Amino acid sequence: PTPHRNHPKKVKPPPKSPPKKTSTHPRPNPVQYVMGFVKYDQDLKVIAVKLSLRCGTTFGGE
């Protein structure tokens, strides 16, 4: 093995994120993400129902 173990490229830490983002949003909340996803899913269903009513047919059968 080479004597130089500490390579500057490997040891270099990752760039820090902007302080504004870190202070405003520390980390995306999983609960909020799930709630948002559920709300989005419900919105999709509502849109699908509205579209089906507008067309006069349901997705289940013609």
Image (cartoon, rainbow, N blue to C red):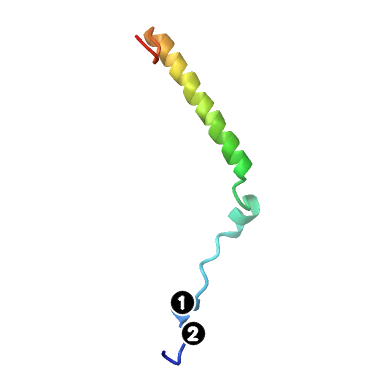
Residue that label 2 marks: 6
Q: Quadrant of residue 62?
A: top left
- Badges 1 and 2: C-beta atoms under 8 Å apart? yes
What whole-number distance in Å separates the C-alpha atoms at marks 1 and 2?
8 Å
Q: Residue 33: where, in percent of width, then height?
A: 57, 40
* Residue at figure coordinates x 59%, y 47% from the top left: 28
Is residue 15 left or right of 31 when viewed as pictured?
A: left
Q: Farthest top residue?
A: 56
Decide which of 14, 45 is in the foreground and name it. 45
Is residue 52 left or right of 34 when viewed as pictured?
A: left
Q: Relative to 15, say whether 21 is above or below.
A: above
Q: Secondary structure at mark 1?
A: helix
Residue that label 1 marks: 10
* Kind of residue indicated by mark 2: Asn
* Residue at figure coordinates x 51%, y 67% from the top left: 15
Q: Residue 59: where, in percent of width, then height?
A: 39, 15
